[in-house]
């Protein structure tokens, strides 16, 4: 599953270690963890895999 796109407020560069995608099994789902920068930029910084 592809991570949601970041919301960029300015020309902030996102960290290279941000989450891009996650592979899931059939009975799994993902909860995305968002990071907010002081300028308002938000990006997916982590995730939790949960059972459906």
Image (cartoon, rainbow, N blue to C red):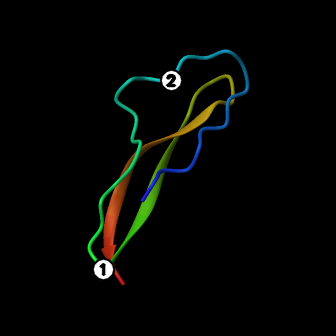
Which of the pair 6/2 is nearer the observer? 2
The image position of residue 19, as x and y in percent, is 39, 41
User: Counting other residues with Cα less than 10 Å from the Cα at mark 1, is it few (<14), some (14-19), or many (20 or more)?
Assistant: few
Q: Quadrant of residue 25?
A: bottom left
Q: Quadrant of residue 8?
A: top right
Residue assigned mark 1: 26
Q: In the rendered image, which quarter contains the N terminus?
A: bottom left
| Residue 49 badge | none
Residue at image point 54% right, 38% down: 43
Residue at image point 32% right, 73% down: 50
Residue at image point 67% right, 15% down: 11
On the rendered structure, is 12 left or right of 2? right
Residue assigned mark 2: 14
Q: In the rendered image, which quarter contains the C terminus?
A: bottom left
User: Counting other residues with Cα less than 10 Å from the Cα at mark 2, is it few (<14), some (14-19), or many (20 or more)?
Assistant: few
Using the image, determine if residue 27 lies above or below residue 6. below
Quick one: which residue is furthest to the right in this view? 9
Q: In which quarter of the image is residue 22?
A: bottom left
The image position of residue 5, as x and y in percent, is 59, 43
The image position of residue 23, as x and y in percent, is 30, 60
The Cα–Cα distance between marks 1 and 2, rounded to whole angstroms, is: 31 Å
On the rendered structure, is 49 left or right of 12? left
The image position of residue 20, as x and y in percent, is 41, 42
Using the image, determine if residue 7 lies above or below residue 12. below
Q: Is mark 1 on a helix, strand or loop?
A: loop
Q: Which of marks 1 and 2 is in front?
A: 1
Using the image, determine if residue 7 lies above or below residue 9. below
């Amino acid at each position: 599953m592809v991570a949601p796109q970041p919301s960029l407020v300015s020309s902030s560069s996102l960290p290279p270690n941000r989450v891009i995608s996650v592979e899931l099994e059939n009975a799994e789902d993902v909860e995305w963890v968002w990071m907010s920068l002081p300028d308002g930029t938000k990006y997916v910084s982590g995730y939790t895999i949960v059972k459906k």
